[in-house]
Image: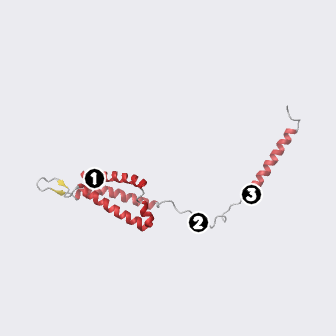
Amino acid sequence: HLPPAGLLPRVVAVVACHCAVCLRTALAAMQNYNEKTFKDVKPAAAAGPSPVLQIGLFCFFVMTRAIHPTIIDASKSVDPETGKKYFAYGEMTVVLGETVVTLIVAQMMALALGGMKEWKAIWDPKPMKVFSFIGFVYALGDFLEMAS
């Protein structure tokens, strides 16, 4: 059954008028923003280190890794009879020494930067398992590097 003739255009006109009123009301309720609206807002701090610092750290890391084999080779002694290079100390001595120094320095840093609460967080078993495995892999890499 169709609506009476002329009713549909009136319904459309009423709906269109209602939508226009809603739109004008919504636009009027919106705040008008201009250059003065945010004059007191401070710009957000840059997230993370600056690009110059990132490049510097990258270069430092590359240089450290590049010179590391040279230092290892320079620390070897030469057998006067065979002319062959060898370590005058156990290969694990350096790895264990570095591990002890890292443990001491890391704990002192935790105490200095975060106090006793931060230091106690080091001994939480869940993250310790993860970081212990990562440390083991690095120690294995150091040992293999020294053995080469």
Q: Is residue 4 left or right of residue 87?
A: right
The residue under label 2 is which amino acid type?
A: Lys
Q: Residues within 10 Å of mark 3 (few under 14, many from 20)?
A: few
* Distance of label 3 from label 1 (alpha carbons): 69 Å
Q: Is residue 135 left or right of residue 26?
A: left
Q: Earlier in the sequence, mark 2 or mark 1?
A: 2
- Foreground tag (2 vs 1): 1
- The residue tagged 1 is 143
For label 2, the SS is loop
Q: Residues within 10 Å of mark 2 (few under 14, many from 20)?
A: few
Q: Residues within 10 Å of mark 1 (few under 14, many from 20)?
A: some
**Most foreground residue, 2 or 54:** 2
For label 3, the SS is helix
Q: Which residue is found at the position 34% from the left and 64% from the top?
A: 104
The residue under label 3 is which amino acid type?
A: Ala
**Most foreground residue, 68 or 33:** 68
**Most foreground residue, 52 or 28:** 28
- The residue tagged 2 is 42
* Distance of label 3 from label 2 (alpha carbons): 26 Å
Please provide percent x and percent y for residue 128: 40, 55
Q: Which residue is found at the position 36% from the left and 60% from the top?
A: 60
Please provide percent x and percent y for residue 3: 86, 35
- The residue tagged 3 is 29
Asked if the residues shown at circle 3 and circle 2 are in contact, with their CB atoms under 8 angstroms apart, the answer is: no
Which label number is shown at residue 38? none
* Distance of label 2 from label 1 (alpha carbons): 51 Å
Q: Earlier in the sequence, mark 3 or mark 1?
A: 3
Q: Earlier in the sequence, mark 3 or mark 2?
A: 3
Q: Which residue is found at the position 45% from the left and 64% from the top?
A: 117
